[in-house]
Amino acid sequence: MATDVQTFYKDKTVFLTGGSGFLGKVTIEKLLRTTEVKRIYVLLRSKRGQEMRDRCAAWDNDPVFVNLMKTNPAALKRVVPCGGDCQEPDLGLSISDRQLLVNEVQIVIHTAATVRFVEPLHIALAVNTRATRLMIQLAREMPHLESFVHVSTAYSNCVVEHVSERFYPEHLTCPAEKILELLESISPELLDNMTPALLGKYPNTYTYTKALAEQVLQLEARDLPVSIFRPGVIIASYKEPMPGWIDNLYGPIAVLYGAAFGVLRVTLLNLKAQAGIVPVDYCVNMVLACAWNTARDSSIKQSPEPPIFNFTPNEDNLITWGGFRDKAAVLRYNYPLSKMMWMPFLHCTTIPWLFRFMAIFYHLLPGYAIDLVMRLCGKKARMIKLYGKIHRNIDILAPFVITSWFFDTVNTRKLWARMSAEDQKLYHFNMSSIDWDDYFLQALAGVRIYLAKEKPGKEVLERGQRIYRRFQFLHRLLQFTLCSGAVAILWSILRRLLGPLI
């Protein structure tokens, strides 16, 4: 028997933006696997010479859809690509595609965004803010619209450390409407030069333009069945579509990945700060539940403003960045990488100058040594260039891994309580239930297979463990040698200073 959420999606047509992204692909997979959705229109653009329809066809072999294709080989036929681009003034939609969406769509899920923290302001505004307004305008034309879910971020209001499920327009330096007028009226170069003044307290263009998008929704979507989903840092899946699935190197996963290779050894990180990390499958489950809940509420009453749902670890099951690091360290022997360059370890500090000093010994000196050996062997030097990129990313991420935020999740808890027991099981997103030890076991296995491209199987795993033990011995030997050398130097200095007294 179908659950309430499954019944809601039965024979419905969904329009999804960001369908080729991390969250988008898992959303498509979950919809196709657990519901009888009629059709999913996906906004896609041509990329790197690959046409939009070719990109969609390639999903047959994408790991995220492997289990789905085994049970339902025809499932992806319900996915229809629509050529478009959120950076374009009209979303890049053709007249015929736009009319098709207007006539058929009942549910809109807007996940598309540029998540690059250093994106030029004119691009971030076009994709994250203007596209949101264009999606609202498109949705308003849809006579059968029942629900619109906008995916924002828990850090869209990171200028305050206690984030409630409300709008924060008071922290914007200028109203969203005025900023969008600037986008249309001045050159991209001039707008980008104004970035520091416009951002105000916001640390980057990503959080700023997501905050602007929320204001657009607050002012322009009051008469629509809209809700805003604010997830924390989205990381590898816990259980669906398979444990540990991930396909990107954003945020803390990049730190985990670099440490697993033995390349990243020191970073800026507040071990006591709360880590607002959430598995991608839990995010997808809540997005689908939000759409159902929004349609249900809009049929009962009209809220004066779109409801907001913060989604981060619950108060009774929080995890710190120190816990993130330590759990990964404890499990590093379980799923080591056979391509590691040294034994994985990670020292952390919150002091920028100390990080720079430590990086000289842990990163730059070994990097120069490796590059020298590579040049002598006739190979291209790459370590110093790599460390330059790593250090820039650490600086960009620093505000988000040093500060500790508290997020109210009242609406999220109410939504969970409103769902039936069957839906809670099928669309599970209760962060209180996560076993973090088990989660990191799955996540490390996923990083190894899906990011490092290690082959699954006992033989490769055992080879990685042998390499780990070898580097562990060399690491201890190096530590002993360096400590012995330091003691010898100190003893020599003391003998010179205190010679007459000895």
Image (spheres, rainbow, N blue to C red):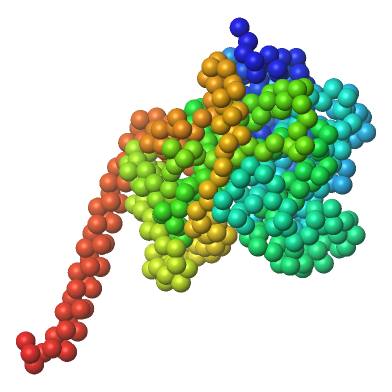
- Residue 349 in picture, x, y percent from top left: 41, 62
Q: Farthest residue to the left: give it.
A: 502
Using the image, determine if residue 194 lies above or below residue 81.
below
The quadrant in which residue 23 appears is top right
Quadrant in which the N terminus appears: top right
Foreground of the two, 56 or 34: 34
Q: Is residue 356 rendered to the left or right of residue 411?
A: left
Q: Farthest residue to the top: give it.
A: 1
Q: Is residue 463 rendered to the left or right of residue 52?
A: left
Q: Could you tell me which residue is drawn at 46 percent across and 33 percent down?
A: 432
- Residue 454 in picture, x, y percent from top left: 45, 38
- Is residue 51 visible to the viewer in this orientation of the structure? no
Q: Could you tell me which residue is drawn at 58 percent across and 60 percent down?
A: 396
Q: Is residue 438 rendered to the left or right of residue 189?
A: left
- Is residue 93 visible to the viewer in this orientation of the structure? yes
Q: Could you tell me which residue is drawn at 78 percent across and 30 percent down?
A: 302
Q: Could you tell me which residue is drawn at 40 percent across and 50 percent down?
A: 322
Q: Is residue 310 rendered to the left or right of residue 364?
A: right
Using the image, determine if residue 212 lies above or below residue 387.
above
Q: Farthest residue to the bottom: give it.
A: 500
The quadrant in which residue 474 appears is bottom left
Foreground of the two, 14 or 59: 14
The quadrant in which residue 376 appears is bottom left
Quadrant in which the C terminus appears: bottom left
Using the image, determine if residue 416 lies above or below residue 326.
above
How many marks do you count on the picture?
Answer: 0
- Residue 107 in picture, x, y percent from top left: 76, 26
Foreground of the two, 414 or 182: 414
- Residue 70 in picture, x, y percent from top left: 57, 17
Foreground of the two, 52 or 255: 255
